[in-house]
Image (cartoon, helix red, strand yellow):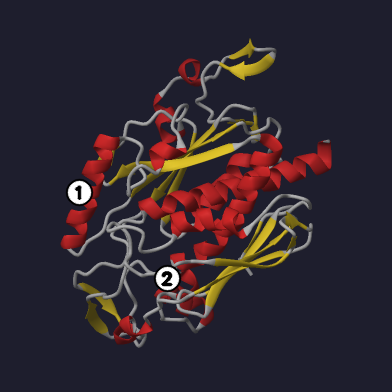
Amino acid sequence: MGSTFGHFFRISTWGESHGAAVGVVVDGCPPNLDLTEDDIQAELDRRRPGQSRVTTQRKEADTCQILSGVFEGKTLGTPILILVWNTDAKSEHYAPFQHIYRPSHADYAYDAKYGIRNWQGGGRASARETVGRVAAGAIAKKLLDTQCGTEIIGYVKQIHKLYADVDPASVTLDQVEANIVRCPDPHCAEEMIAQIDWARRQGDSLGGVVELVARNVPAGLGEPVFDKLEADLAKAIMSLPASKGFEIGSGFAGTTLTGSQHNDPYEMRDGQVHTRTNNSGGVQGGISIGEPITLRAAFKPTATINKTQETVTDTGEATTLAAKGRHDPCVLPRAVPMVEAMVALVLADHYLRQKAQCS
């Protein structure tokens, strides 16, 4: 019921923010892929809370355990279950507003749908759910790197009104990880950190944009007409908590160009078909063409803020709310590995679908 993603490379995440644990079941991963908990832990460490002063101060080690599907360091082709225990949930922070609908949260939406909700940390609607996605994405990344040499790098492109100057063609993971905001533009990163610090002191929050480039993606991935590659990428990105927008290639900016300006001319380079420009973002007709896939994901300002807000209770009474707890003043730095994971899951799934149908 909405907790499963993918076709051939399929994942099902489980768990709530303040439950005993969170995790994922990965089904369809090919056998004999080298895989250890360290491969997964490296990605979880990039997502985990408490990693810097610009993220939530909830202290979770997010240590993963592989409970099935891997034997002697290799995948078996059977379902892989990954578990991460919750160790620092403080549900008492949420008790004062268990009957209050927090503005721009999923509280009312869950009540309207199910007639019941877990008010402790937002339950399933919390970004804590993305632990399973990032763990599964680590496996997808390993598969794509091993079989295709695909490299997926995300980074913070924008926070509030600050825009970084980044070249997707040359950006490296080391540049992204060089600062706590995950922006490979050092000067802009300092300004972003200062802006986030300011928002935290004000009891407020900020949004922004994560940009991503996927290099060495095989041509031919994508299943027209309803499972076009960019359509599945859009669904993947828009399923992330706090996501509000998706662009691929030129995106909305392409609407200001003429067709002659926007078209990507074909040419031969090193015996291969390439495009001279890449306004299409590596996808044409819903199918990858071998050029780098470039996309952007927009995230709203964190909904939980420390300012007093007007709202109503679950019995319809007007009230005010000043939320407490440990929350990201800006989700962007921790959203980077989440966006990477979702892109990896889509590409891995379509890679296996292409092999099954056309190889």
Q: Secondary structure at mark 1?
A: helix
Camera-side residue of 344 and 124: 344
Residue at point 51%, 62% (across, down) = 130
Q: Position of residue 254 (x, y in %)?
A: 44, 28
Q: Badge 1 local density, few (<14 within 10 Å), some, or many (20+)?
A: few
Q: Secondary structure at mark 2?
A: loop
- Quarter holding the N terminus is bottom right
Quick check: 126 left or right of 310? Answer: right
Please say if 153 is above or below 117. Answer: above
- Quarter holding the C terminus is top right
Q: Position of residue 174 (x, y in %)?
A: 43, 38
Residue at point 35%, 88% (across, down) = 315
Number of the front mark, 2 or 1: 1
Please say if 278 is above or below 89. Answer: above
Residue type (three-letter) at the residue carrying disc 2: Ala
Residue type (three-letter) at the residue carrying disc 1: Ala
The dot on residue 194 is 1
Q: Is residue 209 visible?
A: yes
Residue at point 31%, 52% (across, down) = 207
Tag 1 or tag 2, which sits nearer the N-term?
Answer: 2
Q: Which residue is mark 2?
A: 106
Q: Position of residue 197 (x, y in %)?
A: 20, 55
Q: Is residue 226 visible?
A: no
